[in-house]
Amino acid sequence: MKKIIIGIIIFTLVIPLFSVSGFADTKSSIYSKNEIEKIVREKLDLDDELKLEYSNLLTQDLMQKKFWNMEFSGENTSISVTANAETGKITSFYKWIKDDNKRTVNILANTARNNAINFIKSLEPDKFKETEEVTTKTPSVIIYNLERDYIDFNNYHFTFVRKIKDEFFPSNYFRVQVSGATGEVIQYQMQWDDVSFDHSKNLISENKARDIFEKEDQIKLKYMALNVNNKDQDIPILTPVYVYNPKSPNIISAIDGRFLNYDEIYHYGYDLFSGAGSKDMAVAEERSLDNGGEVIPEEGVLSKEKVENMIINTIGRELDIKDLIVQDSGYFNNYFNRSGKFWRTYWRDLDGKKRLYTVVDAENGDILSLDYYKNIDINVAFERVISDNNEVQEISKADNIDENKIKKDILNKVQNLLPFIQNEDINFEITRVSENEDEKSLINVDSSRYINNITYDDNYLRIKYDYNTEEILGFSYRWDEVKAQSPSNIIDKKSIVKKFYDTVGLEKYLIQITDKKAKETKGLDIPLKELLPIYTLRPYNFRYVDAVSGKFLDYNGEEYKDEPSLTLKFKDLKGYKYEQEINLMNKMGILKEKGDYFYPNNSLLKKDAIKWIVEMGWRRNVYPLDGYYEYYQRKDMPIKDIDKDDPYYPYIVAAIENEIIGKTEDFKLDEKAEKLEITKWIIRAMKQDELARFTEIFQNPYEDKENIPQEDIGYVALAKYYNLYRDMETNGMFEGDRILTRGEFIKALYNLMNR
């Protein structure tokens, strides 16, 4: 007995020594948490006031990528950064500044662009030389960044796309967002790959590519229940239309004209059901060890590889884990609001029919969460949901199932996997998986966690079990009555095909192709180094082509109209005295002008004055106005000289409902606006009308006071107080009957915003 006790003591003392040795002798293949923090602080010039609040390590095993995510926080600023854990390169950056979006835009586009370029050059000067800024000539796959610039009225967005031997490679780029208020870079993203492009190969012409697209039967004649024809119909009315049904993924090789398949195109790991080709889980560990060491995010924690081995050794006692391979993992300092150090890991087999998700305490190896599924068949699962109609299949006496024995057997298996679970912690309920004959032996055995005999539903055991084999497998028809329009006078399909391709057109750029050999032999999800030039359709915004009229239709069946985009920069402002103010107000989304010219010297019309006063109120920076354009567009308010379809209608309604103007029978939209009148509108928009009418507390400070009615003195005095016309320090002429120019009015609004 004495020898046994001595042996136990020796064993207890020796085991920790082995554990400590495991930490000390293992070489890390990545930058540690402290090392990456130092690199990030130096590259982004972060001061010591910004404290590191949170960090985690993410590994994308199939893509052979590892990233550190870090969050820094100060009194009025927070910054999140993603950096490559192996190279230290910053791949993304976001800076939040308190109240930044509430401040006035003071930075012009050219200044913001220079700031963006200088920031990129400070991090990646050589890579930047290979890029070109996004313009309307850039492939439309990335043009949406230009459109975002109109939507974000507070900041500037710039995208620089990689160009290799005169061909765009849209998957590699720099994206930068610059604050319109401060000029600081507040967001940065870099996507860059080690690629090549053989420019010597002969490519097919765009005309040849179009011939290939046209020969494919991709435009179909169909009946559709268009909304425009079914607003008040109980029985849907069907309309014959032509619809473009592309041959997926609608991309052809510019080398041989072959249509590509989805599995050929590299999508940065988003193909969740793509096959992984490893035959053994050990391959995952060998990949990491071959890279020069185990992944250790910080001192005192188990490596990624040790955690994976511990999990497999534990759950392999009761679960079928053969052929599982690690897909990705993450290291975190928080799990369900619990601070600590945690590893999250996801496995899957070759066919995607076995999956395992775990969360483990990175310091002691305790398994905190486990989800395991076997024999996953997406199609079968979908059919089962339909047939079962989501109803619980109760176990009946006729099933001849010994529920007590099953519960006892499963409890033994659970406690073999997770010894800390006690009998009183669970209370199993058994239901049938399906009434299908071939699934008669499959049951669900579930329990919430019981603490002091009270359920805690956020903790649970849910088990799918085959009681014949004693194996654990896992811890819509619609037909409407319709009326179809006659298909007479249908336009010939050939004519529609020509019209479609004439309108849409093709574009060419470079893409990455999946490395199938790496996927089949090593289970990796990586692209080939050599890029492939391709042709594809340009994006289009219409949905259908009317089969009778040939008109393009939008999603609801109305005729599609290609709306002109908002103007980013006017052509007639260069040298104009208020050029900067007009450009900044345009950037902030207040002007909402379509066309290339602003006409700053033209007389201000009433309708434009109201429009811009209301738009500034909707931004809520200076004075808040309720509602928005579409809200007032739906309102019914008869106004004699303006139709509800007029684009100015919502502004007039908004001005009336916000008591900026009175509800008159004849507003006379196209009349020129006098200075005193628009001054009163602005003061009312600021909710100062009641104050302005207390005329006895105001004095008229202007030389032409005899021309200003007594009842309007308050409005004029408040305009001077708010320095609306930049005349606070002078007492000259107010000139209330003067017609302001468009440029002068925008300058006045900008003055108000920057008072």
Image: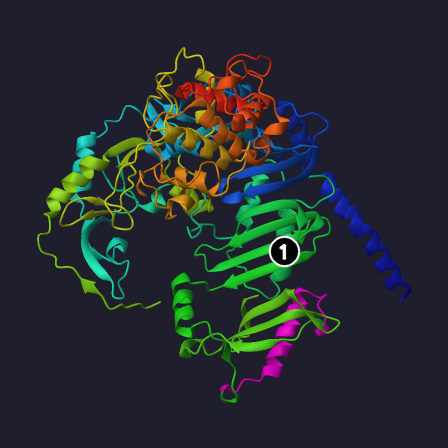
Q: Furthest-top residue in view?
A: 575
Residue at 74% across, 42% down = 300
Q: Is residue 17 above or below residue 393?
A: above
* Rendering coords of residue 660 (x, y %): 47, 36
Tell me the quarter of the image containing the N terminus. Answer: bottom right
Front one among 565 and 47: 565
- Magenta segment: 399-424
By secondary structure, the bulk of the magenta-drawn segment is best described as helix
Q: Is 249 positioned to the left or the right of 273 in the image?
A: left
Q: Residue furthest right?
A: 2
Magenta-drawn stretch contains 403? yes
587 to the left or right of 557: right
Q: Is residue 348 visible?
A: yes
Residue 243 lies, with reference to residue 314, above or below; the image says above
Q: Quadrant of the C terminus?
A: top right
At 88% from the left and 62% from the top, the residue drawn is: 5
Residue 675 falls in which quadrant of the image? Answer: top left
Disc 1 designates what residue? Answer: 311
In the picture shown, does residue 739 fall above or below 354?
above
The single residue placed furthest to the bottom in the displayed view is: 398
Q: Quadrant of residue 56?
A: top right
Q: Residue at x 50, y 76 (%)?
A: 392
Can residue 628 be seen at all in this image of the molecule?
no
Quick check: 171 left or right of 299?
Answer: left
Amino acid at pointer 1:
Ile
Where residue 182 sits in the image (x, y, percent)? 57, 23
In the image, residue 121 lies at what x, y percent?
A: 52, 19
The answer to whether residue 646 is magenta is no
